[in-house]
Image: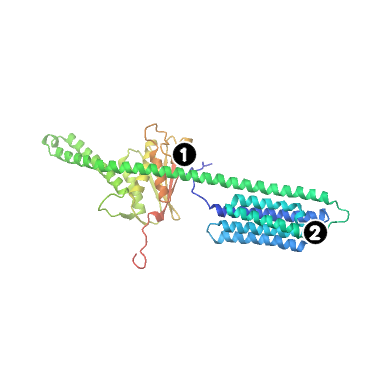
Amino acid sequence: MTPPLARPAAGPGAGAGRKNLMLLIQLRWIAVVGQIVTIAFVEWALDIRLPLAPMAAALAALAALNLVSLLRLKAWPQEVSNQELFLALTFDAAALTALLYLSGGATNPFAFLYLLQVTLAAVLLAAWSTWAMVVVTVACFGGLALAYRPLALAPGADLFELHVIGMLVCFALDAALLVIFVGRVSANLREGDARLAALRQQAAEEAHIVRMGLLASGAAHELGTPLSTLAVILGDWRRIPAIASDAELIADVDAMQAEVARCKAIVTGILLAAGEARGEAPAVTTMRAFLAEIVDDRRTARAVDALVYDDRFGDDVAIVSDSALKQVIGNVIDNAVEASPRWVGVAAERRGETLAITVRDAGPGFAPDMIENLGRPYNSTKGRPGGGLGLFLVVNALRKLGGAVEARNRPEGGAEVLLTLPLAALMLEEPTADGG
């Protein structure tokens, strides 16, 4: 079976208010089912006559509230406010009050379910809302002590025994709901902590990239002058008779001029990616030509026996040539060539509105900890200072463009890196009707 691809962690999820409302919906369904079971047990097992019609109406109101809450979550993407959660809990308290009024009032052991409402409020609501819920539940409990519908007990029924049974059932229901609620809240907190840790890691990586970008930009500025000086000196050497008449020396000078020209092109690319190149407009090209240029450039720059390019992109599209992306893809190919000088395979294809580039090699593959920590700085098996920055830059550069990087070891040996990028990040924007 093909091993799973490793990818960096995902981004933040839904808001806390929406999660809390969903949690209330789930608890309310459990409470409705529990109350139906309890009413049925009291009616038929304990032979206590209850006003089933009005009780059913109260439970139907709770179910209707759940349906409205689900519709609100689906139809409105806005965050759920504290006031909405407070109103929902107040409605729950009112429904519980109606059920208790119809079944003995404050003498009903299920009156202790008010504590569950206060617990939910203390965890989910702001401080003022929690105290307001305390006032609401105390007022409801006090009202039930003054006005309620007495239970119609069967002749000879032991009221104390029935009260103990009711307290046991109430305790079991209360404990089960609290365990479910606290467990879900704890899971939400752990998920929030994980998202916060991921955001902090991303911020640290981006700060690291900024520092590296500043250093690279400064180095590019500093290298411009000595490279120009070397180009002038090499041009002068070509005109020296002793060198011009020696074919071997002329070949060496030509090789040095080619390398200096390449260094100047790299420096220009760094400045262009940093937005510091002057007088150069963005180059318009096509996706297939852009990718073919990258592969051809890697074939020229790197010593590889076989760099196989499989163009499966399909219908071509016009794009703006992005020098940073060109460096990113070239970096992945360079890493593959370094690990597998005899063969590297590059494939490009279009998956809907996404560009997918797969780079394969026949080298030793990734170490398990490298796949686990994909994209972390200095995560490398090369054992040299600064190693591992290539994939770190690749992951973060693609993330900025809305893309992703995945890596795995191939079953037949070697490694595979998959780069995915939305085509919208590179494609030319169609002109609007007003020419904008």
Crowd band around label 2 with a 10 angstrom C-alpha radius: few (<14), some (14–19), many (20+) = some
Residue type marked 1: Asn
The N terminus, quarter of image: top right
SS for callout 1: loop
The residue where tag 2 is placed is: 150
Location of residue 223 in the rendering, given as x and y in whole percent from the top left corner: 25, 40
At 40% from the left and 51% from the top, the residue drawn is 401
Nearest to the observer: residue 363 or residue 237: 237
Question: Label 2 vs label 1: CA separation?
Answer: 66 Å
Q: What colouring does the structure picture have?
A: rainbow
Give left or right: position of 165 versus 365: right
Q: Which mark is residue 311?
A: none
Location of residue 306 in the rendering, given as x and y in whole percent from the top left corner: 36, 40
The C terminus, quarter of image: bottom left
The residue where tag 1 is placed is: 373
Nearest to the observer: residue 312 or residue 109: 109
Crowd band around label 1 with a 10 angstrom C-alpha radius: few (<14), some (14–19), many (20+) = some
Nearest to the observer: residue 194 or residue 89: 89
